[in-house]
Image (tube, coloured by chain):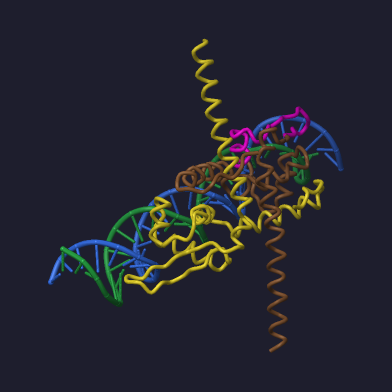
Chain colours: A yellow, B brown, C blue, D green
Amino acid sequence: MAATPKLTKETCNGALAAIRDTLYVLSGKWKILLIVSLREGPMRFNELQRGLVDITPKVLSKELREMEMNEFVVRKVFNTVPVTVTYELTPYAATVFPIIDSLREWGVQHRERIIEHIKQDNKEAVEQ
Amino acid sequence: MAATPKLTKETCNGALAAIRDTLYVLSGKWKILLIVSLREGPMRFNELQRGLVDITPKVLSKELREMEMNEFVVRKVFNTVPVTVTYELTPYAATVFPIIDSLREWGVQHRERIIEHIKQDNKEAVEQ
DNA sequence: GATACTGCTATCCTTTGGGATACTAATATC
DNA sequence: GATATTAGTATCCCAAAGGATAGCAGTATC
């Protein structure tokens, strides 16, 4: 685990470039959410679609194709009737878990903070 | 620091919601990059614009306004001639540093991996 | 023969994020 | 009086992301 470098103009520019790279690969509304879903295990196309309410097949298929190209998922076709296709995470996808976990943790705490704010506001409103 | 919960359907849905929240707050092309820039210290509008090449004043001003609303930055106006305005991170902004660091680290390693791939490809091409 | 299931693709359309360019007020400096 | 500086705003515009809807191939089941 690399330590956070001291922040100078140069390391800042390096950080900006690295972060741009990451955001580019994980771009779009769905890729991160798909990885989260697939952490439960391999899933079929329709399962993924039902899990992520509101994603249309067109978009789902596009995102999955991009994730295949980036070696995040492997697509496996099974000779059943009707065919089943599963998508599963690669070991490389596991390298983004730290990102996902930090996003999740922050989201949880952010929501708690918002709720606290609302409680505060209500209290102040009653006191007046 | 919360441990990563075991992944079940329920925790997965909770994770999805939390991550959606986070992505919503950090949405847009620039907010994360602005936080990275401001980690060096308070900066003025034009400094930020020059630092993030290609951001237009319209977009910069919009992003900064949203970040102010989310309590990520504080805007300070100084009575100089001409006026100077600085933006600086709040303590709350520091809570997203773990996200930023994970994005940066992944980006660095991803780039190294890509370069390795290219080297491999060249080697194989020569061997044939 | 109609319907259902799988995993998609095709077409069309809308939204919106964000870029380009120009412009403002207020003062100081040349 | 022209120009530069600050921190923006105003207006227009465009490309891309993504949603809505329909449909297809292949087989099984009712």
In the displayed structure, B124 sits above or below A9; it is below
Hey, which quadrant is residue A20 in on the image?
A: bottom right
Corner quadrant of residue B57? top right
Of residues B69 and B98, the one nearer the viewer is B98
Which residue is outermost to the front? B6
Q: Residue at x 74, y 39 (%)?
A: B44
Residue A116 lies in the magenta-colored region: no
Quarter of the figure with the C terminus of chain B: bottom right
Left or right position of A31 against B100: left
Residue B69 in the image, given as x and y percentages of width and height: 59, 33
Q: Name the foreground residue: B64 vs D2.
A: B64
Q: What residue span does the magenta drawing correspond to? A: B62-85
Q: If the image is split into quadrants, where does the N terminus of chain B sit?
A: top right
In the rendering, at what x and y percent does residue C17 appear? Answer: 54, 49
Magenta-span inclusion, residue B77: yes
The residue sitting at 72% across, 30% down in the picture is: B77
The x and y percentages for residue A116 are 55, 26
